[in-house]
Image: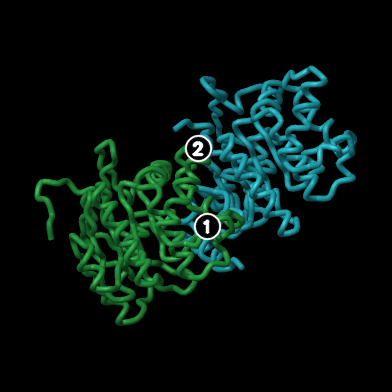
Chain colours: A green, B cyan
Amino acid sequence: MNKIENEVPILRVENYSKHFELHEQHKLIPSSENVNLEVYPGQLTALIGPTGAGKSTVLKGIYRSYLPSSGRLLFRTKDNVEVDLAQADEHLILELRKNEIGFVTQFLHALPRQSTEDVVAQPLVQRGMDKMQARDLAREMLSDMNLPEALWGISPATFSGGEKQRVNLARGLVSRPRLLLLDEPTASLDPHTTEKIITLIEKLKEDGIAMLAIFHHPELVKRMADIVVQLTSPIATEKLLKEIA
Amino acid sequence: MDKVLEVKQLSKIYGNGCPSCFKLTGPEHNTNICPQCGSVIAMHNVSFDLYKGEILGIMGESGSGKSTAVKCLYFDQPPSSGNAVFYDEDKKFDLFEMNAAQQRQLASKRFGMVYQNPHLGLNFDISAGGNIAERLLMSEVLNYSDIRARATNLLTRTEVLSERMDELPKNFSGGMQQRVQIAKALATNPPLLFLDEVTTGLDLSVQAAILDLILEIQQEQGTAMIVVTHDLGVIRLLAGRTLVMKYGRVIESGLTDQILEDPQHAYTQRLVASAL
């Protein structure tokens, strides 16, 4: 662990918990429980733990796709202001998503009827980059991902799992956010492509990009992680679901 | 970021109203009809803001008050109470403090509206091109060839064959009528656009094309939009933030992905779970 002592974290998660209240079923489903972690510029923090330990829930909370039940998610913006992502104004969150925080989810969500290169170029275009220039960068990234050129002009809707994942990664990496959240980025990739991704991630680290990633392979964690955070399943899941009201 | 619209505590009551109206209606009472006086509380205390280039979704079932909100803002009907401020370049308009003539002027120059029913948005007695011309004339574009050129341009943009611009709207299919409505709404390059169930009732492929068109317009022109719909797919595709309404009240609001992935209110959870 080569953590630089006086470096300031870009993200500090303090006592984050998330449970889901399902009103129809009168159930309370715990997911993440009391999670603490830090992410530093140019470093990768790996989240590990069994299925159901709430790893993805941590990432979704940081991205605000989920509303945290408790805890603080302190993000240091490029203007060096610390904001709590759990409380921040929605417009600020949208700004941060556009410019500073990227999320490569487990499954590709893309606008339908868009060509693959446009899907990948989209975050750049949103930031105001010229469409042609954005497409060039997108193509470069797709080629780095080993995605056959014949596929670039068509929609990823009919792609295989591994192809979709490469498109998803390409879109996440091309925009070079200050903080990148990765949910099992190499889960359905062949070893050759996985190596390529590792090289790209190493490159992003060198450029100072901070990453928080979920990995299942201990091998990958060992190679890429600067900090490892182990999550355990919340106790209540083992007792099954607790009734509310 | 520039704020385009700020809406505060907008309410609309049909009927005389009584002191109990707000207490005895709403989602927790499962009605928007006041049991004391029989008034309909179509909308109560709706507040939100809207920024440049942003698409805000208003979602809810029939009768939830979602259309009432945009109809008040477009001056189709006056609200019972509340206020709304529209920020236009360096000017500021207090919408419900203006007189009817000022409201008409602002709506025709700076707002655009697309209704579910094309009969509300188009004049069926004049041609498609004439509908666009009408709006341009109201905003003082008076030269015939300028108007003609702009109409051709808009209809091409919305993929209506410009050879058909002299035809009456009744000769067009439903999807085409919607495109003419959108072209008309865009005629003056308005910074604010209201879309009320614009794809409801259209063929899926036509829906898709119209939704793509709306997204392109947002990206090209940075138009702020309010999209009213009961269709979760439309919300997912278009809106960055969403309000969920029921019985005239906003019961939940947030980032669209959060509303769809982690809905808080029992009603929203049921709505999301019911999506096909």
Q: Residue furthest bottom?
A: A239
- The answer to whether residue B75 is visible is yes
Picture residue at 75% right of the left edge, 19% below the top:
B141
Query: What chain letter is assigned to the residue under label 1?
Result: A
SS at circle 1: loop
Q: Crowding near pointer 2: few (<14 within 10 Å), some, many (20+)?
A: few
SS at circle 2: loop
Task: Tell me where residue B91 sits by quadrant.
Answer: top right
Task: Tell me where residue A187 sits by quadrant.
Answer: bottom left
Picture residue at 49% right of the left edge, 42% below the top:
A125
**Residue type, numbered disc 2:** Asp
Expressed as whole percent of the image width and height from the top left, the position of residue B7 reads 53, 36
Q: How far separated are the C-alphas under marks 1 and 2?
A: 20 Å
Task: Decide if residue A215 is on the left or right side of residue B46.
Answer: left
Picture residue at 29% right of the left edge, 51% below the top:
A204
Task: Tell me where residue B193 sits by quadrant.
Answer: top right
Say yes or no: labels 1 and 2 on the same chain.
Answer: yes
* Quarter of the picture holding the N terminus of chain B: top left
- The answer to whether residue A19 is visible is no
Whichever of callouts 1 and 2 sits on the residue coming sooner in the sequence is 1
Which residue is under mark 1? Answer: A110
Location of residue A16 with respect to A92 vertically, above or below: below
**Residue type, numbered disc 1:** Ala
The foreground one among A177 and B44 is A177
Expressed as whole percent of the image width and height from the top left, the position of residue B197 reads 68, 50
Expressed as whole percent of the image width and height from the top left, the position of residue A145 reads 41, 60
Q: Which mark is residue A130?
A: 2
